[in-house]
Amino acid sequence: MKLIIAIIKPFKLDEVREALSGVGVAGMTVTEVKGFGRQKGQTEIYRGAEYSTNMVPKIKVEVACASDLAPRVVEAIQQSANTGAIGDGKIFVLDLVQAVRIRTGEIDDTAL
């Protein structure tokens, strides 16, 4: 199993969600976050307003999936979140040791 964490621009969330549904992702966790990368302090456009800051609003998407599905999930996120502009984000892929569904006690792939 893999845990895929993607940091994306906020306005790309719907496109990413639709792309992930298209490859068979059953669920995801979404968090509003702030941070910076190489564009430290660069002017950004967010919801139509231009501003300069050292902490840029982003969306963190977390997806737990089977190892064989992970390459398609990464590709779907990369293609749907890409604008070609600086600050498009990052994707991290981590090994997921165990998953447990609290309600039923199912483990690993069946819990996802």
Image (cartoon, helix red, strand yellow):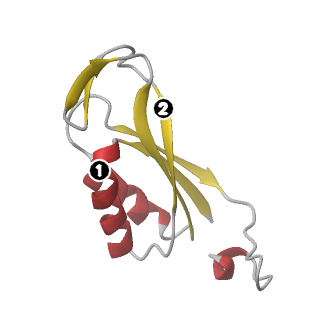
Picture coordinates of residue 105 (x, y %)? 80, 82
Quarter assignment of residue 84: top left
Label at residue 12:
1
Mark 1: give few (<14), some (14-19) or many (20+) Cα within 10 Å.
some
How far is mark 1 from mark 2, CA to CA? 15 Å
Please name the residue shown 77% across and 76% down the image. 102
Question: Looking at this rendering, what residue extends furthest in the right direction?
Answer: 105
In the rendered image, the vertical position of residue 63 relative to residue 54, given as above or below = below
In the displayed structure image, the side of residue 74 where residue 81 appears, left or right: left
In the displayed structure image, the side of residue 49 where residue 94 appears, left or right: right
In the displayed structure image, the side of residue 27 where residue 77 appears, left or right: left
Picture coordinates of residue 41 (x, y %)? 37, 13
Q: Amino acid at mark 1?
A: Lys
Mark 1 / mark 2, whichever is N-terminal: 1
Quarter assignment of residue 85: top left
Question: Looking at this rendering, what residue extends furthest in the bottom direction?
Answer: 104
Label at residue 34:
2
Foreground pick, 110 / 7: 7
Foreground pick, 99 / 50: 50
In the rendered image, the vertical position of residue 84 relative to residue 29, given as above or below = above
In the rendered image, the vertical position of residue 108 relative to residue 88, given as above or below = below
Element marked by disc 1: helix
